[in-house]
Amino acid sequence: MSSTKLILQSSPHLRDDDSVRRIMLTVLIALAPATVASVLMFGTRAVVVLVLAVLGCLAFEAIALKIMKKPLMPYLTDGSAVVTGILLAMNLPSGLPWWMVLVGALVAVVLGKQVYGGIGSNPFNPALVARVFLFISFPTAMTTWPVPGSDLFGMGADVATAATPLGVLKTDGLAALMSSDSNLYMNLLTGHVGGCLGETSAIALILGGLFLLLRKVISWEIPVTFIGTVFAFTGVFYLVDSSTYADPLFQILSGGVMLGAIFMATDMVTTPVTRKGMLLFGFGCGLITGVIRLLGSYPEGVSFSILIMNGFTPLIDRYITPAPFEDKGGELQAP
Amino acid sequence: MSSATMGFPKGGVHPPEEKELSLGAELVTVTPPKKVIVPVTQHLGRPSAVVVNRGDEVVVGQVLAEATGPVSAAVHSPVSGKVLKIADGAVIGADRVPVIEIMNNGEDTGLDAFVQKTVSWKDKSSFLDWIRDAGVVGLGGATFPTHIKLMPPKDATVHTLIINGCECEPYLTADDTLMQWKPAEVLAGCCIMAGVLGISRILIGIEDNKPRAIEAMTVAAREGTYASFFDGDVPSFDVQVHALKTRYPQGAEKQLIDALIHRKVGAGKLPFTAGVVVQNSGTAYAAFEAVAARKPLIDRVMTVTGKGVEKPGNFLVRIGTPISEVVNAAGGAKENLKAIIAGGPMMGKSVKTLELPVVKGTSGVLLLTGEEIEEYRERECIRCGRCVEACPVNLVPCDVAAFAEFRQWDRAGKAMECVECGCCQYVCPANRYLVLYNRLAKYHWRRLQK
């Protein structure tokens, strides 16, 4: 006994077996169905975007850690850079030139995360910072959407492209949208529509979301209030004028609502820590998304809404705290 | 008589229980050692004052140090023999505090004075004094003087005595063992304390991972066997044994009150405000001995367990016995011992040697191997919010930790409500030392208030 060094530490002396790495791995597993769906829809172009985004994020993370004289372990191996890479790819169109994907990875990891001090310190969702950066810098490339299922084994940008359903709705109106696709809702569910890699199959995204809920990596509050608020907000407009505004079901199934509500707005670092704060966060995301889609000039507003609410997160966490542990003056109850 | 409840409503964790290691074996009485080391102060409150001198011959139960005011407790000699020295020595949680060393003459002179007799209810007015004079303190680990908790302020209306038989810390089985071994005596102790308070309602909370203790206590309550210890005009007691769904920290006073009577006693408030007094089941037994045998608190039941000890079990030990002697009675420590914890694994203190005395608050000692404990490297908080979910008193532990890390002590006042149960740190995926940050924040917050 005297030969071995005894552990001396502050209580508690037990920990459960969860870790940052395990959480990241769980998110990766949850992203698998949507990742597979994106490859099925967009073929080798999707694979290229995914691989470049992940390798780019890992490489820039390693370089940033070197510059900041931080060890590669456990930072590079905890899976957080891989998650950022996959989420970035999910937010890009499949035909994006390869170097733009790498610029995105650089922005996500360095400007979105490491300049703030690395994991846990970034105020904004890194993948969305990169998406919006690319969207503003390269508006044409970022809104050129290959048609799903076409030229699956091609590589270049010379692929048939088409507007997303939300794009058609914004520029050509509701009648054009409804006549453009006779099987619109089924295609939205399976992902057979134009869009970013991860903005396609609602079913694949919901499957991943259910897995995250089951593994308690996310809780229901943000996804449900986010999607519910989009539904309610757009539903009111639809009820008032159903000849101009699309129905709320279309609104929640199209664009980035599912991807955003399930995977982007539930990022732990950039969202509130309390359940009540999460309800407010999800409501804000849904409201801003609805306002941008219906009243703004952009066809889609999910990324902006999440980034704006990320900015409110410290305020929400400061003012929405758990109710203190005390009696609410109730009558004494016998057990 | 018995009904299962859900337990306390919010927060908490359920670590592996590990109780089977030390359950099942007989309660072993440890032979008093050649030399005992009795710390002068073994309670929460004002330090006790030494009343013996070096070289004095003492008998079992003789007062070594007396209480210095109401919130204080006497300490008695656990053996008979000679006072070797009164000096500074190491105890659990402190390196230098006053201790009294006594060479045991092995004769246990004076022990036979503490014979259990039938308690006459006519002496009820003396119960409180006897409990106080016996140096009884809370044996769950908090060691607050018991008699103080039995003296509610004038304006408080106490209607219920809650007995804490939860023993919610993993590994520990001392309360479980005592309730199985002496259920009628524990119940009689409860009645004595209820008598002091002038009430009849007694709720006993036991976690449902202790079916044998629940059974023993339920049978004793139903059959009223405890009544045989009394004569005179004994009032009838409404004793209820409640099985609570196992969840740590059920045995934290305020969580237990919430679980049993659905009242939340807020930060800085005492259980009196909810009309209750909470006492540990082991304390009830000590109160019984104090009244029925006029026996001071000179021994206690404790658990020695973990995979680092040969024969884990429960032991009746004299106060002042070096932990090493109890470990020897448990077959000795194993080669691959990695840590020694005094108390449970959630709130106990890690110590560096077995040569420390058992004190009134020592509910157990864990000898853990590398299989059971490891050192953790802290990482950055990822704000996952698990600590918020786990906190039973509704704090945001990650925020307190952030304030502490950046030395913003003036913003960390919430830490004062922390009970240091450790749930937040248990669930933290970044292995943050959240409890330590909370303790730091408390220290500096108090400093700022001065």
Image: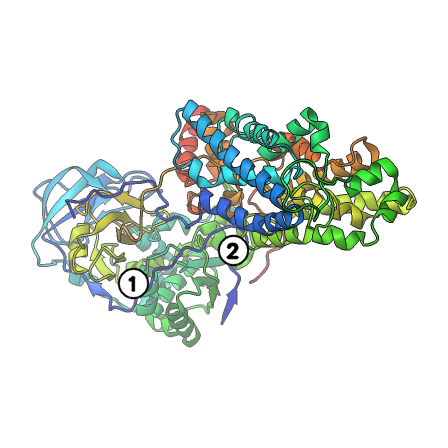
Q: Residues within 10 Å of mark 1 (few under 14, many from 20)?
A: some
Residue occupying image coordinates x 43% and y 23%: A67
Left or right side of A177 for A144: left
Give whichever of B248, A331 is nearer the camera: B248
Q: Secondary structure at mark 1?
A: loop
Residue A131 falls in image quadrant: top right
Q: Which residue is mark 2?
A: B8
Give whichever of B292, A263 is nearer the camera: A263
Left or right side of B207 for A140: right
Reading the chain from its start, which is encountered first: label 2 or label 1?
Answer: 2
Q: Position of residue B5 (x, y in %)?
A: 52, 64
Give whichever of B316, B384 is nearer the camera: B384
The quadrant in which the C terminus of chain B is found is: top left
Q: Residues within 10 Å of mark 2 (few under 14, many from 20)?
A: many
Give the CA separation, mark 2 to mark 1: 26 Å
The subunit letter for the residue under badge 2 reads: B
Q: Which residue is mark 1?
A: B21
Left or right side of B168 for A34: right
In this rendering, which labeled residue sits more in front, label 2 or label 1?
Answer: 1
Residue B289 falls in image quadrant: bottom left
Report the residue that reaches farthest toward the bottom. Answer: B223
**Badge number at residue B380:** none
* Residue B355 visible in the picture: yes
The subunit letter for the residue under badge 1 reads: B
Q: Position of residue A319 (x, y in %)?
A: 62, 33
Q: Amino acid at mark 2?
A: Phe
Q: Secondary structure at mark 2?
A: loop
Left or right side of A209 for B101: left
Give whichever of A81, A316 is nearer the camera: A81
Residue occupying image coordinates x 26% and y 68%: B117
* Residue B62 visible in the picture: no
